[in-house]
Image (cartoon, rainbow, N blue to C red):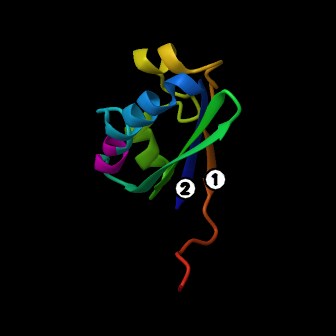
Amino acid sequence: MIARVWKGIVPLEKAEAYGSWLRDSEFGLSHYRATPGNLGAWLLRRVEGDRAHFLLLSTWESLEAIRAYAGPDIAAARYFPFDRECLIEPDPLVIHYEVLESGASSR
């Protein structure tokens, strides 16, 4: 299993709209989850001063499944017009990790 991690920072005044867009747009979580080979996706937000930090974490069956979603250069972040309107210094890279252990707490 492979974890794909993207991060971005937006001004606090755009945080609600951007979070909704990441969650609900055709390019957001629903698109990730609908892609064959996707095992799940999570959207996290942390507010720090006048900025909101977003982290989108998704898990995939394989690098091939990620390529089907992201294209041949899986390390290149994909940005759409609303991203460009909101993000402060968009990160050009997405990071991938091999998942060595996973699972929920037994609580």
Depth check, front residue: 35 or 14: 14
Residue ID for mark 2? 2
Give the residue number, with chain letter if any, for mark 1. 97
The local secondary structure at tag 2 comes to strand
Task: Indicate the position of residue 12 as horizontal and vertical percent values.
Answer: 58, 27
* Residue for point 39% across, 39% down: 69
Taking 81 as reference, is 104 above or below it?
Answer: below
Give amino acid for label 2: Ile
- Number of numbered callouts drawn: 2
| Rendered residue at 53%/30% (across/down) | 73
Image coordinates of residue 78 in percent, x first then y, are: 48, 26
Q: Magenta segment range?
A: 30-34
Report which quarter residue 21 is drawn in. Answer: top left
Distance, label 1 to label 2, CA atoms, is 6 Å
Residue 77 image position (x, y, % from top left)? 54, 28
Mark 2, Cα crowd under 10 Å, few <14 / some 14-19 / many 20+, is: some
Q: Earlier in the sequence, mark 1 or mark 2?
A: 2
Residue at image x 53%, y 23%? 13
Labels 1 & 2 near each other (Cβ < 8 A): yes
**Could you say which quadrant of the image residue 9 lies in?**
top right
Identified by mark 1, the residue type is: Tyr
Residue 4 visible in image: yes
Q: Residues within 10 Å of mark 1 (few under 14, many from 20)?
A: few
Which of 97 and 63 lies nearest the eye of the viewer? 97
Q: Main secondary structure of the magenta part?
A: helix
Residue at point 50% right, 24% down? Answer: 14
Above or below residue 74? Residue 39 is below
